[in-house]
């Protein structure tokens, strides 16, 4: 009986700990989470993109960078990947700047493209690369105005840089 009480106490304590973590998020963290959630929902509904990760650099609740990762369950040529990457990047930057509640926490306002990052993986319905020479991954390098494109090498079973370019 003592063992069961200890197990239940540990489960209760862990659950309480998890609840406390969520209750003590700063205002800034709450606004960042709202932007990420809202944006990922829009991208899912409008483009079928599945969010695979989000990130933020915010020492002392000052937002320096925001990032988001997606998977598109389709193939894309270099031109299609470029168009989608730049379009989503622009929408994400506008979403951040449209949120009045977050402005006091932004390192720069308006928040420029150089402070947001978007990357997109292209995969089949099982989440695997197509391995056919099309783009499997595209990302934008903040502060460099460069796009990088990768495809999967089926012989090495790894992503290989296919192309990179500057953009304005």
Image (cartoon, rainbow, N blue to C red):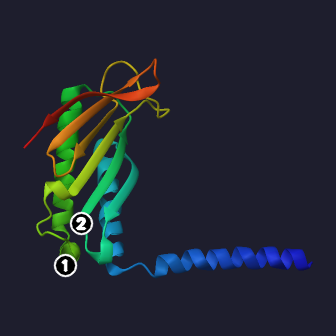
Q: Is residue 95 above or below residue 107?
A: above
Q: Secondary structure at mark 1?
A: helix
Expressed as whole percent of the image width and height from the top left, the position of residue 117 reads 25, 52
The answer to whether residue 54 is left or right of residue 141 is: right
- Label placed on residue 125: none
Residue at left 20%, top 32%?
A: 164
Q: Is residue 102 left or right of residue 133?
A: left
**Mark sitting on residue 104:** 1
Q: Residues within 10 Å of mark 2 (few under 14, many from 20)?
A: some
Residue 84's spot in the image, x, y percent? 22, 39
Q: Residue at x 68, y 79 (%)?
A: 13
Give the residue displayed 38% in from the left and 34% down from the top. 73
Spatial CA span between label 2 and label 1? 12 Å
Q: Nearer the viewer, residue 1 or 160?
A: 160
Label 1 environment density (alpha carbons within 10 Å; few <14, some 14–19, many ≥20): few
**Residue 57 point in image, percent of width and height:** 31, 65
Instruction: Say which label, 2 or 1, has the lower sequence index.
Output: 2
The N terminus: image quadrant: bottom right
Q: Quadrant of the C terminus?
A: top left
- In the figure, 87 relative to 23: above or below? above
Q: Is residue 90 above or below residue 103?
A: above
Quarter of image, res 79: top left
Residue corresponding to mark 2: 64
Q: Secondary structure at mark 2?
A: loop
């Amino acid at each position: 009986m003592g063992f069961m009480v200890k197990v239940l106490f540990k489960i209760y304590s862990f659950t309480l700990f998890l609840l406390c973590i969520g209750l003590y998020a700063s205002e800034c963290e709450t606004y960042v989470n709202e932007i990420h959630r809202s944006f990922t929902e829009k991208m899912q509904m409008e483009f079928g993109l599945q969010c695979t990760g989000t990130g933020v650099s915010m020492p002392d609740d000052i937002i320096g960078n925001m990032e988001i990762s997606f998977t598109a369950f389709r193939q894309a040529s270099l031109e299609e990947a470029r168009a989608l990457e730049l379009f989503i990047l622009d929408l994400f930057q506008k979403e951040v700047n449209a949120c009045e509640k977050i402005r006091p926490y932004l390192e720069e306002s308006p928040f420029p493209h150089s402070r947001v990052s978007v990357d997109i993986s292209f995969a089949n319905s099982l989440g695997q690369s197509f391995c056919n020479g099309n783009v499997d991954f595209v990302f934008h390098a903040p502060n460099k105005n460069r796009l990088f494109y990768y495809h999967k090498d089926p012989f090495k079973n790894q992503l290989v840089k296919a192309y990179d370019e500057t953009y304005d």
